[in-house]
Amino acid sequence: MLQRLSRPAVRMVERYLPDPYIFVLLLTLIAALAAMLIEGRAPLAVMRDWGDGFWGLLSFSMQMLLVLVTGFMLASSPPIKRLLDRLASLARSPGGAIVLVTLVSLAASWINWGFGLVIGALFAKALARRIRVDYRLLIASAYSGFVVWHGGLAGSIPLTIATPGHFSEAEIGLISTSQTIFAGFNLLIVAALFVIMPLVNRWMLPAPRDSVYIPPSRLTEPGADDRVTIERPADRLENSTLLSWLVGVPGLAYLIYDFAIAGGGLNLNSVNFLFLMLAIVLHRTPRSLLASLNEAIKGGAGIVIQFPFYAGIMGIMMGSGLAESLSQMFVAIASAESLPFWSFISAGVVNLFVPSGGGQWAVQAPVMLPAAEALGADVARVAMGVAWGDAWTNLLQPFWALPVLAIAGLNAKDIMGFCLIQLVVTGAVIGLGLTLL
């Protein structure tokens, strides 16, 4: 049944979904018009909100670019290539490949969202080199695991409200992760998705006549030429294993110190640092690493040009009060029992325009927390409703798919038809979990 449903969805998206750059331009215009028509914001004020926010994600943009580049360099190192290929050999059929990549992506994303994005895409390519399987669905399955990130160990909202000094501490105090990430209802939602998502993706597998295959030769990350010519002293440095290890090994030692002794956590910076140091060590020579870097950087164009526009949209949504108004619209129809569900739905809508967990919580918390207090709702569950809503519509929002698409060599329209089905299924699972569990 899902195979029949996914076929028209894929065709519709391939026909009508524009390039992600066009998508972000349209979202910019929609946000600006909504701010003027709904909030009564003057055009000059909207333009100022947009311009003031435009460069608000520069640091995050660089982090995301490094997620792509360092992950690609790590995966293109000979030892990691062999490891991914060995793991990919566990899949014996197209359906098995879809199930396996979904489980790996879910597990990696639950640990850390940046880790999940890169590992899922790279493992999908390793599978496609071994198994003749629809490449679009394989990458969509790798991306689908990302839906659990905000209910996992790196969830920014549950970690924020568990951290002393957070902006709403005076109102709600500290809420332990035992009430959010490790609460029974949240763990059951995660467990349900670990069971349902691999099956959903497997059931969407197109018939061979409708499948899109990629030749394995196009999926191999080229490395440096194995032939080494030493003609000048600089060549010795470029091909020096010792030089790489003198930098990479201390870098890895620092990470061990940071985690084991200093109590550092797993975040985007530490993931990028880990990927980079491992890549330096495993490529063995600077020459090999730089050859991989030259390939990796080609896929970063979408991140560089599009993320500032999303920052501008966030500026409009926050500066005009539009994000707050959207949240209040859903709160107005909620009860104590249904507020977590409507928090989830409202966060999903806001996430299309404000694709940032921390930024979204800053906008929605001033609306959701007083509502939870007034209605007598469970604050921890309401916060997780916002968190899950932020993660949920990432399946429809190409913002987060850009690193995956860059690694895979696909366009958003290639996978979003499948993601549309995933969106409906995961929405039902998460909504029921927040309401009934």
Image (cartoon, helix red, strand yellow):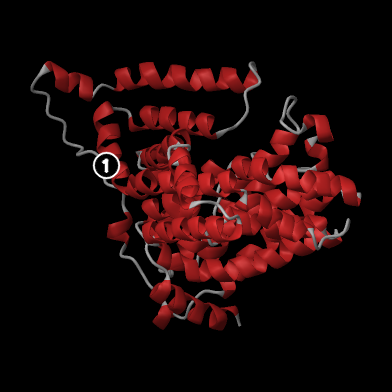
Circle 1 sits in a helix, a strand or a loop, which is it?
loop
Q: Say whether residue 399 is left or right of residue 345.
A: left
Give the residue drawn at x 76%, y 32%: 162
Give the residue drawn at x 37%, y 52%: 406
Examine the rendering and report whether any part of residue 399 can be seen. Answer: yes
Quarter of the image where one finds residue 79: top left
Residue 374 % position (x, y): 89, 48
Give the residue number, with chain letter if any, for mark 1.
223
Residue 58 % position (x, y): 43, 35
Give the residue drawn at x 70%, y 34%: 160
Name the amino acid, label 1.
Gly
Q: Is 247 drawn above or below residue 32 in the view shown?
A: above
Examine the rendering and report whether any part of residue 89 can be seen. Answer: no
Which quadrant would the C terminus be assigned to in this image?
bottom right
Q: Say whether residue 403 is left or right of residue 170.
A: left
Q: Viewer-proximal residue, 362 or 70?
A: 362
Label 1, residues with CA under 10 Å away: few <14, some 14-19, many ≥20: many
Residue 433 % position (x, y): 79, 60
Q: Is 143 drawn above or below residue 231 in the view shown?
A: below
Q: Viewer-proximal residue, 153 or 399?
A: 399
Which quadrant would the N terminus be assigned to in this image?
bottom right
